[in-house]
Every structure is written in structure tokens, then in C-alpha cells.
Amino acid sequence: MHILKIIAYILVLIGALNWGLVGIFGFDLVATLFGEMTLVSRIVYSLVGISALILALTHRDIFYHHDM
């Protein structure tokens, strides 16, 4: 499960950086590398979205304060 979270974290970072590029410069890196809405780019977008769900569902410790 730890490896899955690391992979999900990396994919979410890639997605966030891509959205930052889109928002600031109007440049979609994924579409540039793999084509606009090709099968590969749709897989990348889907994996980023699934990764965000994985992190949201498995990182309860972010939302709860634990006393040490």
C-alpha cells in the first residue's frame, strides 16, 4: 500500500503541475506530449484523477489531529 501511495502522490503532483501550466501559460504538457484526447493522454488524465481519489480516501491523518 505504501508504494501505491507514493505512485499516487507523484501522479497528483504531475497533474497539479500540468494544471498550473494550463492556468498560468495556457500550455497543456500532457496534450503536447501525447496528443489532445488521445488514448494515452486520457489514460494519464484518468490515472491522475484516480490517484487523487486514492490519496483523498487514504490520508485521514491529514484531517484529524493526533496528540503525541
Image (cartoon, rainbow, N blue to C red):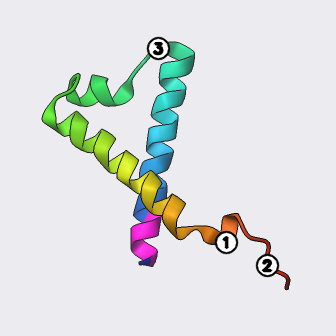
SS at circle 3: loop
Dots 1, 2 in contact, CB < 8 A? yes
Q: Does residue 40 sit above or below 67 in this rendering?
A: above
Q: Earlier in the sequence, mark 1 or mark 2?
A: 1
Question: In which image quadrant can residue 41 be found?
Answer: top left
In the displayed orientation, state which residue is furthest to the left. 39
**Residue underneath mark 2:** 66
Disc 3 residue type?
A: Gly
Disc 1 residue type?
A: Asp
Residue 42 sits inside the magenta stretch:
no
SS at circle 2: loop
Quadrant containing the N terminus is bottom left
Residue 36 falls left or right of residue 51? left
Residue extent of the magenta highlight: 2-6
Main SS of residues in magenta: helix
Q: In 3D space, how far apart are the residues under numbered discs 3 and 2 (Cα atoms)?
A: 41 Å
Would you call the spot at circle 3 few (<14 residues within 10 Å), some (14-19), or many (20 or more)? few
Residue drawn at x 29%, y 23% is 32
Foreground tag (3 vs 2): 2
Query: Which label belongs to residue 26?
Result: 3
The residue lying toward the viewer, choosing from 26 and 57, is: 57
Q: Earlier in the sequence, mark 3 or mark 2?
A: 3
